[in-house]
Image: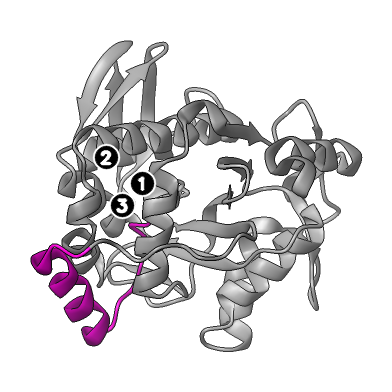
Protein backbone atom coordinates (compact mmCIF):
# COMPACT_ATOMS: atom_id res chain seq x y z
CA UNK A 1 0.00 0.00 0.00
CA UNK A 2 2.80 5.04 -0.19
CA UNK A 3 1.35 5.23 1.48
CA UNK A 4 0.93 1.68 0.93
CA UNK A 5 -0.72 -1.23 1.42
CA UNK A 6 -0.25 -0.82 0.61
CA UNK A 7 -2.48 -2.62 0.21
CA UNK A 8 -1.85 -3.45 0.77
CA UNK A 9 -0.91 -2.66 0.77
CA UNK A 10 -3.05 -3.02 1.36
CA UNK A 11 -1.68 -2.41 -1.06
CA UNK A 12 -2.20 -2.03 -1.76
CA UNK A 13 -0.47 -2.54 -0.29
CA UNK A 14 -2.13 -3.00 0.50
CA UNK A 15 -1.32 -3.34 -1.15
CA UNK A 16 -0.87 -2.14 -0.46
CA UNK A 17 -0.33 -2.19 -0.69
CA UNK A 18 -0.96 -2.96 -0.48
CA UNK A 19 -1.45 -3.29 -0.24
CA UNK A 20 -1.94 -3.16 -0.87
CA UNK A 21 -0.65 -4.40 -0.91
CA UNK A 22 -1.40 -4.38 0.00
CA UNK A 23 -3.56 -3.47 -0.31
CA UNK A 24 -1.97 -5.89 -3.34
CA UNK A 25 -1.19 -9.23 -4.67
CA UNK A 26 -0.02 -7.99 -1.37
CA UNK A 27 -3.28 -8.53 0.28
CA UNK A 28 -4.77 -11.00 -2.15
CA UNK A 29 -1.70 -12.94 -3.18
CA UNK A 30 0.52 -12.82 -0.13
CA UNK A 31 3.56 -10.85 -1.19
CA UNK A 32 3.88 -8.99 2.15
CA UNK A 33 6.39 -10.73 4.37
CA UNK A 34 9.59 -10.41 6.30
CA UNK A 35 11.12 -13.88 6.15
CA UNK A 36 13.99 -15.25 8.16
CA UNK A 37 16.75 -17.25 6.43
CA UNK A 38 14.99 -20.56 7.03
CA UNK A 39 11.75 -19.17 5.63
CA UNK A 40 13.43 -17.98 2.44
CA UNK A 41 15.15 -21.35 2.02
CA UNK A 42 11.87 -23.20 2.46
CA UNK A 43 10.07 -20.97 -0.02
CA UNK A 44 12.83 -21.23 -2.62
CA UNK A 45 13.01 -25.02 -2.33
CA UNK A 46 9.25 -25.20 -2.76
CA UNK A 47 9.51 -23.32 -6.05
CA UNK A 48 12.46 -25.33 -7.36
CA UNK A 49 10.90 -28.66 -6.44
CA UNK A 50 7.68 -27.93 -8.28
CA UNK A 51 5.63 -28.92 -5.25
CA UNK A 52 2.22 -27.36 -4.80
CA UNK A 53 1.76 -24.47 -2.39
CA UNK A 54 0.40 -25.35 1.05
CA UNK A 55 -3.38 -25.38 1.34
CA UNK A 56 -5.15 -22.85 3.54
CA UNK A 57 -6.94 -25.29 5.84
CA UNK A 58 -8.94 -22.95 8.08
CA UNK A 59 -12.57 -22.21 7.21
CA UNK A 60 -12.60 -19.08 9.35
CA UNK A 61 -12.41 -15.59 7.93
CA UNK A 62 -8.89 -14.12 7.98
CA UNK A 63 -8.39 -10.36 8.30
CA UNK A 64 -5.10 -8.58 7.67
CA UNK A 65 -4.18 -5.01 8.54
CA UNK A 66 -2.10 -3.48 5.72
CA UNK A 67 0.06 -0.57 6.84
CA UNK A 68 2.10 1.75 4.63
CA UNK A 69 4.64 3.94 6.41
CA UNK A 70 5.96 7.39 5.53
CA UNK A 71 9.50 6.52 6.63
CA UNK A 72 12.34 7.73 4.41
CA UNK A 73 15.66 6.00 3.92
CA UNK A 74 18.00 6.66 6.83
CA UNK A 75 15.28 7.66 9.28
CA UNK A 76 15.30 5.75 12.56
CA UNK A 77 12.40 7.29 14.51
CA UNK A 78 9.16 5.26 14.53
CA UNK A 79 7.07 6.27 11.50
CA UNK A 80 3.36 6.94 11.18
CA UNK A 81 1.27 4.72 8.96
CA UNK A 82 -0.34 6.96 6.40
CA UNK A 83 -1.90 4.05 4.51
CA UNK A 84 -4.28 1.85 6.48
CA UNK A 85 -6.30 -0.84 4.71
CA UNK A 86 -8.21 -3.66 6.37
CA UNK A 87 -8.25 -6.66 4.02
CA UNK A 88 -10.40 -9.72 4.65
CA UNK A 89 -10.80 -13.12 2.96
CA UNK A 90 -13.56 -15.61 3.67
CA UNK A 91 -12.70 -19.22 2.65
CA UNK A 92 -16.29 -20.38 3.11
CA UNK A 93 -17.97 -17.84 0.81
CA UNK A 94 -14.93 -17.39 -1.49
CA UNK A 95 -15.18 -13.64 -1.07
CA UNK A 96 -12.87 -10.82 -0.04
CA UNK A 97 -13.02 -7.16 0.90
CA UNK A 98 -10.98 -4.02 1.47
CA UNK A 99 -11.80 -1.10 3.76
CA UNK A 100 -9.54 1.97 3.64
CA UNK A 101 -9.25 4.21 6.68
CA UNK A 102 -8.03 7.82 6.21
CA UNK A 103 -4.90 8.75 8.13
CA UNK A 104 -6.56 11.74 9.87
CA UNK A 105 -9.47 9.74 11.28
CA UNK A 106 -9.95 10.81 14.92
CA UNK A 107 -10.25 7.63 16.99
CA UNK A 108 -9.58 6.15 20.40
CA UNK A 109 -6.08 4.70 20.63
CA UNK A 110 -6.18 2.22 23.54
CA UNK A 111 -4.15 3.54 26.46
CA UNK A 112 -3.48 6.87 24.75
CA UNK A 113 -6.84 8.62 24.46
CA UNK A 114 -8.05 10.20 21.22
CA UNK A 115 -5.62 10.76 18.36
CA UNK A 116 -5.25 10.38 14.61
CA UNK A 117 -5.46 6.74 13.60
CA UNK A 118 -2.11 6.95 11.79
CA UNK A 119 -0.37 7.67 15.10
CA UNK A 120 -1.25 4.29 16.67
CA UNK A 121 1.72 2.44 15.18
CA UNK A 122 4.14 5.21 16.17
CA UNK A 123 2.81 5.38 19.72
CA UNK A 124 3.09 1.61 20.07
CA UNK A 125 6.71 1.66 18.93
CA UNK A 126 7.59 4.54 21.26
CA UNK A 127 6.05 2.64 24.16
CA UNK A 128 7.83 -0.62 23.33
CA UNK A 129 10.01 -1.57 20.38
CA UNK A 130 7.93 -3.92 18.25
CA UNK A 131 4.69 -2.74 19.88
CA UNK A 132 3.50 -0.72 16.89
CA UNK A 133 1.62 -3.45 14.99
CA UNK A 134 -0.24 -4.59 18.10
CA UNK A 135 -1.43 -1.10 19.05
CA UNK A 136 -2.44 -0.37 15.46
CA UNK A 137 -4.37 -3.64 15.40
CA UNK A 138 -6.16 -2.90 18.69
CA UNK A 139 -7.05 0.59 17.51
CA UNK A 140 -8.62 -0.70 14.30
CA UNK A 141 -10.45 -3.49 16.15
CA UNK A 142 -11.99 -0.98 18.56
CA UNK A 143 -13.12 1.27 15.71
CA UNK A 144 -14.58 -1.44 13.48
CA UNK A 145 -15.72 -4.01 16.03
CA UNK A 146 -14.14 -6.95 14.15
CA UNK A 147 -11.05 -9.01 15.00
CA UNK A 148 -7.83 -8.41 13.05
CA UNK A 149 -5.72 -11.56 12.74
CA UNK A 150 -2.47 -10.41 11.11
CA UNK A 151 -0.60 -7.37 9.90
CA UNK A 152 1.73 -6.45 7.03
CA UNK A 153 3.93 -3.35 7.01
CA UNK A 154 5.60 -1.89 3.93
CA UNK A 155 7.58 1.30 3.27
CA UNK A 156 8.46 3.27 0.16
CA UNK A 157 11.36 1.05 -0.91
CA UNK A 158 9.41 -2.17 -0.47
CA UNK A 159 6.48 -0.86 -2.47
CA UNK A 160 8.65 0.21 -5.40
CA UNK A 161 10.55 -3.07 -5.32
CA UNK A 162 7.33 -5.09 -5.38
CA UNK A 163 5.97 -3.23 -8.41
CA UNK A 164 9.23 -3.61 -10.30
CA UNK A 165 9.36 -7.33 -9.39
CA UNK A 166 6.13 -7.92 -11.34
CA UNK A 167 7.14 -5.75 -14.30
CA UNK A 168 5.12 -2.64 -13.52
CA UNK A 169 1.36 -2.26 -13.20
CA UNK A 170 -1.21 -1.09 -15.75
CA UNK A 171 -3.73 1.41 -14.35
CA UNK A 172 -6.54 3.37 -15.97
CA UNK A 173 -6.09 6.96 -14.82
CA UNK A 174 -9.60 8.40 -14.75
CA UNK A 175 -8.68 12.08 -15.08
CA UNK A 176 -5.54 14.24 -15.23
CA UNK A 177 -3.58 14.24 -11.97
CA UNK A 178 -1.22 17.15 -11.33
CA UNK A 179 0.74 17.79 -8.17
CA UNK A 180 3.22 20.67 -8.12
CA UNK A 181 4.27 19.96 -4.54
CA UNK A 182 4.74 16.22 -4.35
CA UNK A 183 7.00 15.44 -1.34
CA UNK A 184 9.91 13.38 -2.60
CA UNK A 185 11.82 10.92 -0.42
CA UNK A 186 14.50 13.49 0.45
CA UNK A 187 11.77 15.99 1.43
CA UNK A 188 12.32 18.07 -1.70
CA UNK A 189 9.29 18.92 -3.86
CA UNK A 190 8.78 17.68 -7.38
CA UNK A 191 6.10 18.19 -10.01
CA UNK A 192 4.25 15.08 -11.16
CA UNK A 193 1.59 14.71 -13.82
CA UNK A 194 -0.47 11.77 -15.06
CA UNK A 195 -2.41 11.91 -18.31
CA UNK A 196 -5.79 10.14 -18.26
CA UNK A 197 -6.00 6.69 -19.81
CA UNK A 198 -4.35 3.28 -19.60
CA UNK A 199 -0.64 3.31 -18.76
CA UNK A 200 1.99 1.06 -17.23
CA UNK A 201 3.64 2.44 -14.11
CA UNK A 202 7.03 1.34 -12.81
CA UNK A 203 7.83 1.29 -9.10
CA UNK A 204 8.67 4.98 -8.78
CA UNK A 205 5.70 6.16 -10.84
CA UNK A 206 3.39 3.83 -8.93
CA UNK A 207 4.54 5.36 -5.66
CA UNK A 208 3.70 8.82 -6.99
CA UNK A 209 0.26 7.60 -8.08
CA UNK A 210 -0.72 6.10 -4.73
CA UNK A 211 0.83 8.86 -2.58
CA UNK A 212 -0.22 12.13 -4.22
CA UNK A 213 -3.24 13.86 -2.73
CA UNK A 214 -2.94 17.52 -3.71
CA UNK A 215 -4.95 16.87 -6.88
CA UNK A 216 -7.91 15.61 -4.86
CA UNK A 217 -7.77 14.54 -1.21
CA UNK A 218 -6.78 11.81 1.21
CA UNK A 219 -10.05 10.10 0.32
CA UNK A 220 -9.25 10.21 -3.40
CA UNK A 221 -5.83 8.79 -2.66
CA UNK A 222 -7.43 5.87 -0.79
CA UNK A 223 -9.61 5.08 -3.80
CA UNK A 224 -6.56 5.13 -6.08
CA UNK A 225 -4.72 2.78 -3.73
CA UNK A 226 -7.56 0.27 -3.90
CA UNK A 227 -7.67 0.59 -7.70
CA UNK A 228 -3.94 -0.07 -7.79
CA UNK A 229 -4.23 -3.13 -5.54
CA UNK A 230 -6.80 -4.67 -7.87
CA UNK A 231 -4.59 -3.85 -10.86
CA UNK A 232 -1.66 -5.57 -9.20
CA UNK A 233 -3.77 -8.62 -8.46
CA UNK A 234 -5.04 -8.71 -12.05
CA UNK A 235 -1.53 -8.59 -13.46
CA UNK A 236 -0.28 -11.26 -11.07
CA UNK A 237 -3.07 -13.59 -12.19
CA UNK A 238 -2.52 -12.85 -15.89
CA UNK A 239 1.19 -13.59 -15.57
CA UNK A 240 0.52 -16.67 -13.41
CA UNK A 241 2.90 -15.44 -10.73
CA UNK A 242 1.70 -17.85 -8.04
CA UNK A 243 4.46 -20.42 -8.84
CA UNK A 244 6.98 -17.57 -8.57
CA UNK A 245 5.63 -16.36 -5.21
CA UNK A 246 8.50 -17.94 -3.21
CA UNK A 247 11.19 -16.08 -5.15
CA UNK A 248 9.19 -12.83 -4.98
CA UNK A 249 8.88 -13.25 -1.23
CA UNK A 250 12.61 -13.85 -0.99
CA UNK A 251 13.40 -10.70 -2.98
CA UNK A 252 11.15 -8.60 -0.74
CA UNK A 253 12.23 -10.11 2.58
CA UNK A 254 14.36 -7.16 3.67
CA UNK A 255 11.76 -4.47 3.01
CA UNK A 256 8.51 -5.83 4.42
CA UNK A 257 7.42 -7.02 7.86
CA UNK A 258 4.52 -9.30 8.76
CA UNK A 259 3.53 -11.86 11.40
CA UNK A 260 2.36 -14.30 8.71
CA UNK A 261 4.52 -17.40 8.31
CA UNK A 262 5.78 -18.34 4.81
CA UNK A 263 3.44 -21.34 4.65
CA UNK A 264 0.48 -19.13 5.61
CA UNK A 265 1.35 -16.59 2.93
CA UNK A 266 1.57 -19.23 0.22
CA UNK A 267 -1.65 -20.85 1.44
CA UNK A 268 -3.46 -17.50 1.36
CA UNK A 269 -2.10 -16.83 -2.12
CA UNK A 270 -3.54 -20.10 -3.36
CA UNK A 271 -6.89 -19.36 -1.69
CA UNK A 272 -7.02 -15.82 -3.06
CA UNK A 273 -6.23 -16.96 -6.59
CA UNK A 274 -9.65 -18.61 -6.80
CA UNK A 275 -11.63 -15.58 -5.59
CA UNK A 276 -13.42 -13.89 -8.47
CA UNK A 277 -12.86 -10.14 -8.87
CA UNK A 278 -16.62 -9.68 -8.62
CA UNK A 279 -16.54 -11.17 -5.13
CA UNK A 280 -14.19 -8.46 -3.83
CA UNK A 281 -15.95 -5.58 -2.06
CA UNK A 282 -14.00 -2.30 -1.74
CA UNK A 283 -15.05 0.59 0.46
CA UNK A 284 -13.47 3.79 1.82
CA UNK A 285 -14.33 5.65 5.01
CA UNK A 286 -14.63 8.92 3.11
CA UNK A 287 -16.08 12.43 3.23
CA UNK A 288 -19.65 11.09 3.03
CA UNK A 289 -19.42 9.57 6.52
CA UNK A 290 -16.90 11.84 8.25
CA UNK A 291 -17.00 15.40 9.50
CA UNK A 292 -14.03 17.73 9.34
CA UNK A 293 -13.06 19.08 12.76
CA UNK A 294 -10.27 21.19 14.24
CA UNK A 295 -9.18 19.97 17.67
CA UNK A 296 -8.56 22.44 20.53
CA UNK A 297 -4.84 21.94 19.82
CA UNK A 298 -5.35 23.04 16.21
CA UNK A 299 -5.10 19.65 14.51
CA UNK A 300 -7.32 19.17 11.44
CA UNK A 301 -8.94 15.75 11.68
CA UNK A 302 -11.93 13.73 10.47
CA UNK A 303 -14.64 12.61 12.89
CA UNK A 304 -16.21 9.29 11.82
CA UNK A 305 -19.93 8.64 11.85
CA UNK A 306 -19.65 5.41 13.81
CA UNK A 307 -23.05 4.11 12.73
CA UNK A 308 -22.17 4.61 9.07
CA UNK A 309 -18.76 2.98 9.61
CA UNK A 310 -20.49 -0.08 11.03
CA UNK A 311 -22.63 -0.26 7.89
CA UNK A 312 -19.50 -0.24 5.74
CA UNK A 313 -18.02 -3.01 7.86
CA UNK A 314 -21.14 -5.08 7.25
CA UNK A 315 -20.87 -4.50 3.50
CA UNK A 316 -17.20 -5.50 3.40
CA UNK A 317 -17.40 -8.43 5.81
CA UNK A 318 -20.89 -9.63 4.87
CA UNK A 319 -23.15 -11.81 6.97
CA UNK A 320 -20.20 -13.52 8.70
CA UNK A 321 -18.86 -10.27 10.22
Is mark 2 in CB contact (under 8 Å) with mark 1?
yes
Residue found 64% across the figure and 56% down from its top: 61
- Place of residue 177 in the rendered image (x, y in percent of width and height, measured from the top left): 39, 19
Foreground disc of the pair 3, 2: 2
| SS type, badge 3 | helix
Residue denoted by label 2:
236
- Place of residue 41 in the rendered image (x, y in percent of width and height, measured from the top left): 17, 80
Residue denoted by label 1:
25
Left or right of 306? Residue 225 is left
Foreground disc of the pair 1, 3: 1
Q: Where residue 229 is drawn, which disc sits there? A: none
Please tell me which of labels 3 and 2 falls first in the chain. Answer: 3
Near mark 3 (Cα within 10 A), the count class, few <14, some 14-19 or many ≥20, is: many
Q: Quadrant of residue 238?
A: top left
Q: How many marks?
A: 3
- Place of residue 180 in the rendered image (x, y in percent of width and height, measured from the top left): 36, 27
| SS type, badge 1 | helix
Residue found 47% across the figure and 49% down from its top: 10
Cα–Cα span, label 3 and label 2: 15 Å
**The residue stretch that appears in magenta:** 30-51
Residue found 62% across the figure and 76% down from its top: 134
Left or right of 307? Residue 198 is left
Q: Quadrant of residue 49?
A: bottom left
The foreground one among 97 and 204 is: 97
Is mark 3 in CB contact (under 8 Å) with mark 2?
no
Residue 143 counted in the magenta span? no
Left or right of 225? Residue 114 is right
Quick check: can you spot residue 55? yes
Residue 42 counted in the magenta span? yes
Residue denoted by label 3:
159
Amino acid sequence: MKRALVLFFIAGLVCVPLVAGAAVYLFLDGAFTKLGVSGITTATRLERSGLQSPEWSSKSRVTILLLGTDQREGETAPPRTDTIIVATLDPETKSAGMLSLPRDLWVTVPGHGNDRINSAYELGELQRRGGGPELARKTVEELLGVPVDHYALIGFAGFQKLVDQVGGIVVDVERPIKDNEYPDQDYSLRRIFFQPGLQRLDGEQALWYVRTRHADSDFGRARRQQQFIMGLRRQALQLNLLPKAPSILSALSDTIKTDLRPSEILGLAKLAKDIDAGAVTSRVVDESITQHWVTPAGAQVELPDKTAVKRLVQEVFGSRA
